[in-house]
Amino acid sequence: MIDALLPSAILVATVGSGLMAGLFFAFSVAVMPALRRLPPAAGAAAMQSVNRAILNPLFGVVFGGTTVLCVLLAVAAPFSAQHATAWIVVGAVLHVVGSFLVTAVWNVPLNIRLDAVDPDAAAGTWSEYLVRWTAWNHVRTVLCTASTTALALAV
């Protein structure tokens, strides 16, 4: 049963990881640099709006669904006859760490802290947020890109 489902699951996880890598990449190279150019109150308000807008069902399916699928792949792949088990496990673990854990441990707490601030009084919080959030987003970008690559090699 595992061997019959694994190729499709790997393909779906590869696409999901690629979508997340692309989202994180877009934030690293375009969104955060654009927000950095705004006055602090405008940048903080815009990011607060982005953080609220991204919490939607489609994002939830891709972010959460890919994470769950990668956990299942990391657990199931070693018990399969799949020739690329190591690539599957490496790709799955990189995704879970890069997308889910980094987001949960570093980016979300920063988002919560920013959300609690009045944008008009956010200058200090905003400048710290920009540096820390963006640095952790770069980590997510690299790890999800590596995940996508490893999973693609498994396909």
Image: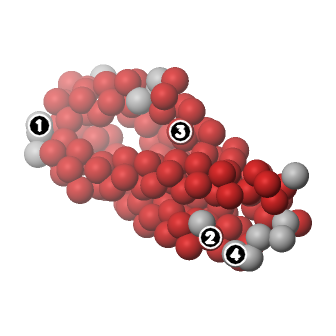
Check contact, mark 3 vs mark 1: CB within 8 A.
Answer: no
Q: Which residue is mark 1?
A: 39
Q: Secondary structure at mark 1?
A: loop
The residue located at (64%, 47%) in the rendering is: 67
Q: Earlier in the sequence, mark 4 or mark 3?
A: 3
Residue under pointer 2: 154
**Residue labelled with disc 3:** 62
Residue 38: where, in percent of width, then height? 11, 39
Q: Which circle marks residue 84 in the picture?
A: 4
Label disc, if present, on residue 127 of the rendered structure:
none
In contact (CB < 8 Å): disc 1 and disc 4:
no
Amino acid at circle 3 = Val
Work out whether mark 3 precedes mark 1 in sequence or the reverse, and give the earlier one.
Answer: 1
Task: Locate residue 6: give its quadrant.
Answer: bottom right
Q: Residues within 10 Å of mark 4 (few under 14, many from 20)?
A: some
Position of residue 88 measured from the top left corner of the image (x, y, whole percent): 68, 67
| Residue drawn at (41%, 30%) of the image | 54
Q: Camera-side residue: 120 or 112?
A: 112
